[in-house]
Image: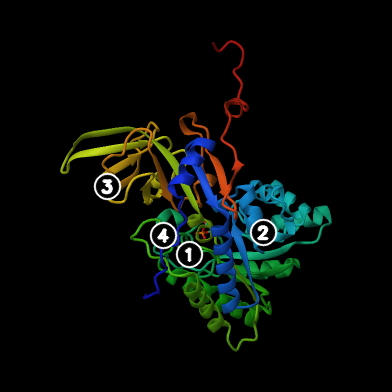
Amino acid sequence: MTSAVAKDTRFRLDDREAMHLASSFGTPLYVVDEGHFRNRIRAYRQAFAAAYPNSEISFASKANSTLALIAIAASEGCSIDVASEGELRAAIAAGVGPGQCHLHGNNKSEAELTVAIKLGIGHIVVDHFGEIELIQNITSALSLPCPRLVLRLAPGVDPITHAKISTGQADTKFGFNITDGSAERATSRCLELGLNLYGYHCHVGSQLLDPEAQRAGGELIAALAVKVRDELGFAAQYLNIGGGLGVKYTEEDSPMGIEEYNQLVVSAVVAALSGTGLSPKLGQEPGRSLVAESGVTLYRVGVVKTVPAKSIGKRTYVTVDGGLSDNPRPALYGSRYTVLPVGKEATEPSHTVTVSGKHCETDKLFGDIQLPESTQTGDLVQVLCTGAYNASMANNYNRYPRPASALRRLDGTFTEIQRRDTWEEMFSRESVPEGLI
Ligand SMILES: Cc1ncc(COP(=O)(O)O)c(C=O)c1O
């Protein structure tokens, strides 16, 4: 598919800012630019509304559930997509009303559903037959009205992306298959029970640089909506076509522009609904494409080491003070990133290095990176496009404290929005029973 290629809009710090931040907050440090994030949300909302006015954007908070960022998304008019009780609690802690949240999850517990229903969740995205019965039991036991229910559908399309972030194919743990009739049976069951069925949802995958799968997914769920209206008499009021628009991690990535993407996916849905009398509200729930390019991670260089390497003769490892615990994506998905030096002249001679982390793994954090030959211990580097699925995937492997996050405010000042883990927190959940030592 041909597309107008989006230009490089990734946020980056200037050298002065990077040095100031490293000395104020330490490294590794996540930094998100408020203006950039707000502009991405505005561009997405405007493009969606231009293509389909009766529309709604939810911020997929799994991409980055730092409270300040959820608050920014909500202040820009997004509802919040939460995939667990924890993300729901994060949204509430950020000041978002539960009615503005949508609860996802392929294996929601009774306790999670009960909390969400009691709080007055905006809608629940239902994933399987057992969940329909569970919601019926909970609402009748508590004499509470059934929240809006949206059935997650597996439309049976295979996106071109990493297998671990493909979700729209028929062989998936997510949702009701359209191809085997599960989607219609689930609809019938909700109607039989008198539940508050609101519409349908699909999310086919993530980091999609070719949007064909989203286009096909939207078309298929719209066609399903028409079919159930004709056969079962249920008129969907809402269709959500998920998230998944890719971003520019490296120079090789050319994601489709937001406007063109919205035109493309919306027109597929509109065409499938045309002449049917159905005019549901349309939703999308992007995460990565809203926040990834708004964030960078700042690291300080430690050891620089050149070793013999088969076929290439020698390899230089530039080791930074983070890695697998603040960015597990390279290890999980083989993800690649752009790494930029701080405080070096663009004219300096550079060479190809492997940027590695400090964990007890052979963690080639970022391979084939061009850095100045003068790169040495104590220098800073910034990694672009780390606003999504970095802070939210951070962990304590090797007992490293998770990094702090700073927000670059609209006036250019920086505020810490999440502090680094403390040693007290690190051990506060544990105890050593008597007699072990
Ligand atoms: C159901 C659902 N919605 C939305 C998203 C957000 O996707 P992305 O961050 O690629 O836009 C995901 C990501 O996994 C998801 O599983």
Query: Who is closer to the viewer here, 367 or 130?
Result: 367
Q: CB of residue at label 1: within 8 Å of ligand 1?
A: yes
The residue to which callout 4 is attached is: 248
Q: Are marks 3 and 2 in contact (CB under 8 Å)?
A: no
The residue to which callout 2 is attached is: 74
Which kind of residue does numbered mark 4 sit on? Lys
Rounded to the nearest whole Å, what is the CA distance between mark 4 and mark 1? 10 Å
Query: Who is closer to the viewer here, 267 or 291?
Result: 291
**Rendered location of residue 320, percent (x, y):** 38, 37
Rounded to the nearest whole Å, what is the CA distance between mark 1 and mark 3? 36 Å
Q: Hey, which quadrant is residue 223 in on the image?
A: bottom right
Which of label 4 and label 1 is nearer to you?
4
* Quadrant occupied by the N terminus: bottom left
Upstream in the sequence, badge 2 or badge 1? 2
Q: Residues within 10 Å of mark 2 (few under 14, many from 20)?
A: many
Q: Residues within 10 Å of mark 1 (few under 14, many from 20)?
A: many
Instruction: Please state if 1 lies on the left or on the right of 264 as rendered.
Output: left
The residue to which callout 3 is attached is: 348
- The image shows residue 238, relative to residue 369, as above or below, that is below
- Please give the count of numbered marks on the rendered protein: 4
Upstream in the sequence, badge 3 or badge 2? 2
The residue to which callout 1 is attached is: 245
**Rendered location of residue 23, percent (x, y):** 50, 36
Which kind of residue does numbered mark 1 sit on? Leu
Upstream in the sequence, badge 4 or badge 2? 2
